[in-house]
Amino acid sequence: MDDTIDVSGSHGHDASDGYGNGANAGQAGIGSDGGNIDVTLSSVPYSNEPGLINIYGTETYSNGHVEYINSNYNLGTEGLIHFTSVGGNGGNGGNGANGYDGYNGSNGIDATMSTIGTDGERGGDGGDGGRGSSGGNGGNGGHIKISVNEYDAHLLMLIGEFEVSGGIGGNPGYHGIGGKGGSGGMGGQSYSWTETIPAVYEYPSNNALTRYDPDTVDATIHFRGIEETKYRIRNTGDSWEQSCYYDARISIDSGDSNALTRYNGPPIEYYSTEETYHYDRGFGEADIYHLRQDDIYLHGTVNANYHDNFRLIEPAEPPEPPEPILIIPEEIITHTNPGGIDGDNGCDGYTPTEFLNGGYMGTNGSFEFGVINEYGKWQRRDEKFCKLEINSVECVIQNNSGIFEPGSSINVGMEIFNTGCPTPKHTPIRIELDEYNTWIVNNPKVDAPLNLLDYDSKNIGSDQGMTIKINDPKIVTNGIPLSVPINLNKFKATMTKIERPVPILTHSSISFVIQQPINISEVISIRSPGSLQYEVFWFVNNISYLSFGQDSTFKRLIRTKLTRGESTGIEIDNQEIRYIEAYQSIQITSKLSLDQDYNGIQQFTVTLQIGDNDDRPNILKSIQTRKFTIQPPLAENIPHLFLDVTKNECINLAGSNISYCKDNGSINLTLSKEIHYSVKGSIKFGDGTLILLDHNFNFDKDAFIYITQKTSPMRCDVNLITDENESHIFALIANTFEDRSNKIDWKFQTINRINNNINTYSTPFKLRVEHIIHYIDHGTKIFEPNCKGFIEKVIVFNEGEMPSPNNQDIIISLSQTSNIIPDNSFFRINKSIPYCGTFESENINLRFSIKNNENGFNNIIPLRIKDHIKFNTNIKSINHTIQNFDNFPIQEITIQYPIEMGEYLGYRNPSATEEIYSLYWKIKNISNVEFGKSSNIGRLIVTSVDNNIPNNVLHIKEIESLMSENYSLETTKIKISDETLLDPFNFKLYLGSIETPETLLPIQSYPFHLLPLSREDTYKKFDLVFDLNEGRLALNNQQLNDYIQPGNFKFTISTPKSKDVKVGDVEIQGKLQYTNGWMIKINERFTLDISGWIYLYTNGKDNISTGSINIKVAQEDTHLLYLIDKSCLEKCDDQLYRVIDNNRNLEYNRIYQFTLVNYDCTPADDSGIYEPGGRIVIRKIEVENTGGMPTPISHDVEISINLLNSTEISLPNDNSLKLPKPIENSVKKILSPIKSDDELCLEFQINQQSKASRDRPLNITGKINLKAIMFGINREIKNFTLPKQFNIQYPIQICPDTKIQDIPYKNITRITWRLNNISRIDFGSESKLKRVIKVQVKIEKMSPENSLKFKTDRGLNDIFEQEISLLEAKQSKDTFCELVRTLKNQHSTVIDANLSITLFIGSIQLPDREFDIEIRNKYIEVFPSYESNSDSDVLLVANAKTTKKDTIYWDELCRKFGLSMSIWNIKREGHFDLFESSIIKDYLGKSIVILNDELNGNKYINQIINYLDPTQFYQTVKYYNIKFFVIGMNVSDQKIKELFIPIEMINSKPIASYERVKRYIKSTKKLIISEDMKYEKSEEKKFQNLKRTLDLECINTHLLPGDMNCFASEESYRMNKLRKLSKSLQKLYPGDQHIILSTISNNSDYDQITLCKTTNRTKQYLTYNSVQLDDIDDHQIERMSMIGLLSCIPFSKRLEKLRQFLFDPIQDADQKKVLKSLIEADLAMELNGLCGSNIISKKMRLMISDILLIQLELFGKFCEFVKFIISKENSFSGEHTKWALSVFAKLKILLHYSNNILFFRNNTRIYELKQIIYDGYLKAFEKCNNQYYPLLHYLKIKAKSIKKNWKNNFELKHDKKEKLKLFRGYMIGILISNNLKTDNELFNDDLDIIISDDDYKIIEQTHKNTINRIGKIKTKHQEQIELLEHQANFENLRSDSNHGIEVNNIGSAEDFTETANQGLEASNFGSEDITVITNQGLEASNFGSEDTTVIMNQGLEASNFGSEIGTENS
């Protein structure tokens, strides 16, 4: 079994997956490195057990641990010892959790009668997916070394695998998938109701002023009031002027056109106009002029004598009221309040896309092994194994036969080559065959050479090699002779002592073939003619070097036998071969006969037997058989003899499949005749086999010798020989010599024995009938059934090269066929016919008759029976026929009738009610004599049509005469009825018989179907379809495939001449030639009605380009051409139209074509906008005749709008236009080219929209289409179409490209948008159209309620409305409204509101009545402006990306810990200046939280922290103790570091300067220990000190090496000096941090070091997130936010909160834990900041404790807090006391690790700090002191416990410096674990900030650039505020001006003052209270006021429309 020594590294832990919605995954661990192995392998003494070995040596692990090995291992025969030192695998990354799915939005509220439906709520957004983590890195592999001694060299084979690979990096995790957004709620349903408007009646006596008194006349009183206002706006002051004047007059009727008797309107009319002009003078100055004019008309009658007094007389009361006249009937109007819009779906949560990496794979280790030789030297081996190769093999047979016969032996030698390590010197390797073979009966083997070096070889001779014995299984092979190739190439080698396999390859195998020395070939067979007897042949072959047979030297017998069936079957033949030479063959010939009682395949077997071996030659053994089968021949082939060199009559089973086509074959035969036919010669088959023939055959009268060769590409030579007097024997040879497909070279030879010569021919004699002459009774030349005839003459021709026999009689007679009946006459040929010679018979009369045909009407096609005239031949001497004697040209005859029927055509006649077909067919005479009743022979011809119903003939006709080779075209019309729909119709043909011509015989019929038009058909009932490729009458309308050529039309089309002509009636006369060549003539009238079309298909529906159309038409009928379908004409290439005009023939190749080229659709108001409700006029209609002839002149073409093919329009009228006549081809005509008042043009109106568009301007597409109608045929012109699309829009829009913005400034939020006038005309109440434009902004929803109001000219309001008095064409106007917060700004509440902005426009008909056309929604969040609030604890710095949800979260978080919060919104304030604002005063010693979001648009100010002035930050943290927490976008550590570096360190003058560093240190020490200079902490700076000069000190020294330090580099020398200075500063100023700036001087002798004391190392001032927030989940972000907030509040505040929470059981335990952990972190930072100096001089030790106590400020506060805890619990067992004790213990451990590092050994400061910690501890726990153990004992025990538990977390050991760093991180773990980082941690490893002059300048320049950019942003913001205020002030002025103008607006007054007059009557329409004072006849009107006061005047009434207070006129 295997064993393994393993020193691999451990695997890193897998990262945890994110838990909860959107949670991020944890981090994966890394794998550790593999160790080292060094061992030696040896054999166990006195043991022969394979695989038992001893191993001794060492194992060294990666952590340094060493283990020793000395053990025995039993590996058995297969086991191996493996060595592994693999690096540990990295842990797998974790998977982020999926984000939560958003909530579904709630549905909107349904509409009611009073309210519209509300929109559905937007679905909630899905949560973001959590971030996965990358995999951990793998550890590195180790090193392995293995050794053996020379005697145990074979043990190297027991070494298994070396695994030293590096650990595999962990797989990356996967990001969580963002949650799916929630579905938006469904909008509320719409609500509809009806309103009934009562009928309106006219009462003539009251509504029409009627003259009833001859003394009165009609009169009109006109009152006009004009008011002018001028308003001047100046920088020095504003002024305005107002003037009013009035005019009144009366108009008396004088009987002209203005007579009031013609007036039928209301008695009172009112008109008002208003104009405003604005002139901008610039610099804020403007002039505004306003004019208003009001006109009132009072209609009535006045006394003619007193009209000067303007006194109107009331109409008299009529005696009876007249009957009312209905003007407007009652109307029911349906109203609909629209439903809401479905809410949008929520957005899917963000799925992180950052690429997660797999951990890196560790580097691979190394391994080696070797042998210790006899001299003790270790020799490296590259291979563990010997690798043997067999390069060559030699095989030797034991006898000389050359055949590896079964039972023989073989000797094998070989060459061995070694490519591996040397073979052992003392251990042999055994080589043997490694494969089983039944032919090998022994186990051959041999040993490999010893000590065969690598890449060396040695030979093993065949006499020393292995011996192989071949088996003799005594098997008999069938078919192919035994031939077993043996290829032995599998060997195995074995190391003998351990029995382990040694690798061995074979390049040369042991190869030989086992076979028998004698074999037999395949069997060949030829069948004898006329029987089932076969001649069979096979060969016996000797393939050895020795002879065989009874007469041979070795006398080994050979015998073959033929049996029926298997080899054990009935024996047919048995032959012995007495002798056969080596490598010779012998042919064996035999015969067999098939079993006549069995027709299937029959099997036979040939068996070969030889002597057993040389020792037993007479003992026969069967070694091979040849089984073959014979298929009995077909009966027709039995008489013949078939010879083919590529075919064998038998099939060899298990044969060799040797091709018979690989070689040239040959046949050489001599033919003769005695009793039998003798055939002698040879046949060479295509496989090379040659057989000899000497056979006698018998041939029947019709038997032939067929010699063929077609399947082989090789040619065959055929030579046939006979005596010349027996040349007639060649009649036996079948005519295959005529077949050109036979690849045979023929030769026919005759031997003349007398002349002793040989004649050679390429063909034998070939007699053929060349021509015959026959005659039919009556001379019709038609072989008609039942007719008679005879053969008059026969001519015989010899086609063969050989002459026909001269001494033989050849008898010839007529042969009977199925239709030809001969008599018994014959004639003979008795002389030789030479080559190409002929023989003509004389006066023979071979008579015959034709059989009668009784099919009658079953002949559905003309009778055609094919037959042949044949002759019988016989060579009398041999009684044999001549082949192919009848092959002559007119041998075939056709039996048919002389009269036949065909060419059946038809077409459907157009009709709406009937299905009528016109039928055409032809009767043809194909004979050369006349037929019919009037012909000489008198044979009748009759044709008919029926519907397959007995005795129901639909049409019948007798043809009187039909001349020879002529036809008669028959036609009729057939109506289809429902009863006959399924039955076929029949054409029938009758012919008089030969014997009795008047007796009609049925000779042919033709059935066909006529199908009615169906709904699925393309054509309509009135369509006329001529398809020249169809139209054939057939059963089921199955068209024939008889295409010949394209068809053509040639006809005349005209209007019928009768009186009853209707629209669509046409007459067609002409010819139709179909594609199969058939032609018909038509002359018919068709009714197409108003819907039918004529379809002309010249070549079928799929190919109408070919063929021709030739039409003749009169000029007045050219409109009929349009009835022809245009799709047929457009594609036909050959057209001709002959137009007859006053005896003129005009020819055209195309008809006319009306083409609509273009037209204009112009809005009637010239706005260029297709507005809903707008009237659109169509002009410039351009029509072109694109055809080839002029348009018709006899009938008009009318153009109108095609409403069915248009969209979004309606027709106010039904106008139409007529085209001019005629329009010549290629000529254009334009209709309505210009605009005129009396023009009749086409127009349409755009449909109104049911509701306003939302979130975008209306923009839909409409379509207009025209149509044209041709009168006379009343057809729409199909291709007269040119659809045009237009965009339907309102002329006024809220600009779609302008984003509606909310701009905050001061306490105002401005909402801005832009209005566009996209039309070409002005809009607004001051425009010519006076169509008003109005915008309304409403707050649909807000939180808190009533927290926002619109700023309007009438104060604060809930709705903002603005009218745009004028918006010029193609102009835009920026408009805005302003919202004011009604909450106090210092409140941290953010207001959110949903606004709707609705655009109104006046309607086209009523321009002063507006309606809504567009609604935009805007969601805003209004942040408070910052106001000073010294009570606030935390300032939240928000930005444009901060949402109300964010502020609520931070406010609630602050409240949770009792903190108050204010907000500074940079978007609203425009900057983040800490000093110009009151921030520095309000947050002295407090906290600022900056939401550091990423900003877009500025590459420098790309995050909020860039708004922070670096100089202000430096002063804030140094002098004002304000702490910052920055959360959001990642901030680089370098950016944080630079914030703590001030500017102007180089330019500012230092307060002190020193030469040399030593002098500075010495002077500083004296300063610190002087009596008058105590060390004390700086006071907190007052907030009034906005600027501080830097406390700089300067040291002049050398920073470059001198001559004595020439080996030191400049950089190392400088840095070494600066570090020493830094250490000295830490001695002098514990806890303080300095900026050390080094300047290399080029001109001075000294370089310069500038010192600046900066922040304290014991405090943290800024906390920020160390990871991207996108990489962590929401829960982690919330916890990070909470801890970051608490980390930046003051330490005292934290202790105070903890004091409040600590003993309150209701408070959250986690909050207590967080506060405790943060307190620990601050204490650790403070203590760690003081552990930074070396031994201090004795003079300073006296002051150290005081200094450190002052620096340990937080520790002192903590000790006081602990006293509070002790006072509450008073026991070490208390929960919080234990915590306090652990804090002291951790501080003790921190000092311990600080003291243990090399730099701090014997550190006085550490000692002093430890004493301070102990003293504070003892004082804090003073109450817990007891007599058993001192207090310090408890502290030490606690410290020991904490240290032990802490160390258990680490698997690896760490040095002392690492322990300090790790424990320091442990104490501030609350920050690290929550991905937070502080400036204290950032600067922790740096005692001071050391920076070069060049680096400082870069940082300083960066600060200055930032300060400059911030300044520009502030300035720009201020300018924007000023601009906004100026705009607001200007709008207020305009609003005030309008207020003055609107004093007299109609309908807006609450009080109305009216002046009484002499005769005017006062009326009040719609007011609540009316006070009327009687006047003298005139009526005053007040529209819409609430209260009315009437004041008397002299007959005129003063009206005040729209003012609040009327003006009194006396």
Image (cartoon, helix red, strand yellow):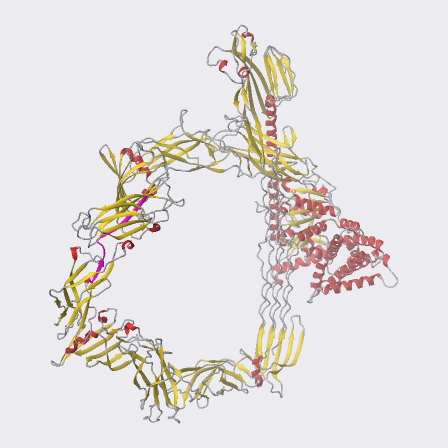
Compared with residue 753, is residue 1888 higher up or lower down, i.e. above or below?
A: above
Q: Give the range drawn in magenta.
A: 890-908
The x and y percentages for residue 188 are: 60, 39
Compared with residue 233, is residue 554 higher up or lower down, i.e. above or below?
A: below
User: Image quarter for residue 471?
Assistant: bottom left
Compared with residue 945, is residue 1326 higher up or lower down, i.e. above or below?
A: above
Q: Is residue 1489 left or right of residue 834?
A: right
The x and y percentages for residue 1078 are: 26, 48
Q: Could you say which is closer to the camera, residue 793 or residue 303?
A: 793
Q: Is residue 1189 left or right of residue 439?
A: left
Q: Does the magenta stretch include residue 2003?
A: no
Predominant SS along the magenta part: strand
Q: Could you say which is closer to the camera, residue 548 or residue 178?
A: 548
Screen quadrant of the N terminus: bottom right
User: Image quarter for residue 289?
Assistant: top right
Badge count: 0
Q: Is residue 982 left or right of residue 778?
A: right
The answer to whether one can see residue 1830 in this image is yes
